[in-house]
Image (cartoon, rainbow, N blue to C red):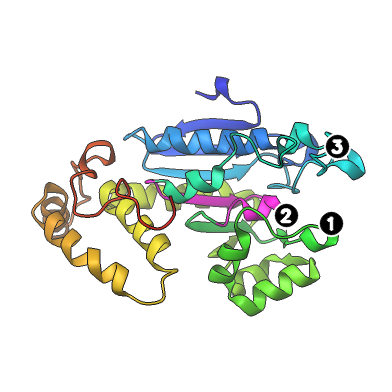
Amino acid sequence: MSAAFETLLVEQDGPILWLRLNRPEVLNAYTSQMGAELARGIALADSDDSVKVVVITGTGRVFCAGADVSAGAGAFDTESGEGAKNFGSRDGRRENSDFIGAMMNSVKPLLVAFNGSAAGVGLTLTLPCDIRIAADTAKFGCVFTRRGLVPEAGSAWFLPRLVGLATALKWCMTGALVPAHEALAAGLVSELVPADQVETRARELALEIAANCSPVALALTRQMLWRFSGEDGPQGALAVDAALNIALGARADVHEGVAAFLEKRQPQFPLKVSTDLADLPWSPTKPTGYR
């Protein structure tokens, strides 16, 4: 499976698809190729019913040090051509690297396991994911203003929703590195563990989700939360949640979920994301919000 990937290690471990940033010699520095491969890895998970959860982590001691600046002072200059290799074409696009779109449209839960520090795009590429855990030694940096840049990858939208506007402003205006305990208190990450236990804990959490939750319900739930949480009121959610639960209540997953609960056993949900979303009264295949 990983033969087609150069900047990632891609491995399926039971119901989990691991996407490991794999440029440890440069602290997993981001390039547009990495973005494109992240998008492709998520698409791979979305199309495979045997994958229940995606976990993104890094190899080595750092999750991602940020953008690859090996081109020197002109590393971000796609106009002169110095930055074109790592960050796109002369018109400023990051070609074939819409990992944000892939993450937002994904029908699989996306977990992040920060094995170490993350800065710049190394942090912002994780913001559209659903659950983030981190090594207790990790640090996080919204360093854009210190490089003469602005927050990218949609982070001006994502970050305030995760940590609040006041904290997002502080982090982005100072560009300073934030220790793990501050990231936990702000809600950027949900838990901290020792660095050597990050993958173990991520695997436990992913397996808990895979073993106990309906894949169809998960796909619908993550899309509803991401799409409707940004609206001014509950009307959008109210317009779909009752209709969805009426439709789902007549289907096999709900019957199985209730039976498993009453019988005190793990459920074996029969519905599949690939075939059982499209004819629901609302689904990720019927565009609203981010598309």
Q: Determine crowd level at label 2: few under 14, some 14-19, many 20+ residues with C-alpha closer than 10 A.
A: many
Q: Residue at x 43, y 39 (%)?
A: 16
| SS at circle 2 | loop
The part of the chain drawn in magenta is: 107-127
Q: Earlier in the sequence, mark 1 or mark 3?
A: 3
Q: Residue furthest left?
A: 250
Closer to the camera in the image, 125 or 239: 239
Q: Which of marks 1 and 2 is nearer the N terminus?
A: 2
In the image: residue 216, left or right of residue 39: left
| SS at circle 3 | loop
Asked if residue 60 is positioned above or below residue 160 in the image, the reply reads above
Asked if residue 89 is positioned above or below residue 99 in the image, the reply reads above
Closer to the camera in the image, 278 or 56: 278
Residue topped by disc 3: 80
| SS at circle 1 | helix
The amino acid type of the residue labelled 2 equals Gly
Asked which quadrant contains residue 25, the reply is top right
Asked if residue 16 is positioned above or below residue 284 in the image, the reply reads above
Magenta stretch: residue 108 in it? Answer: yes
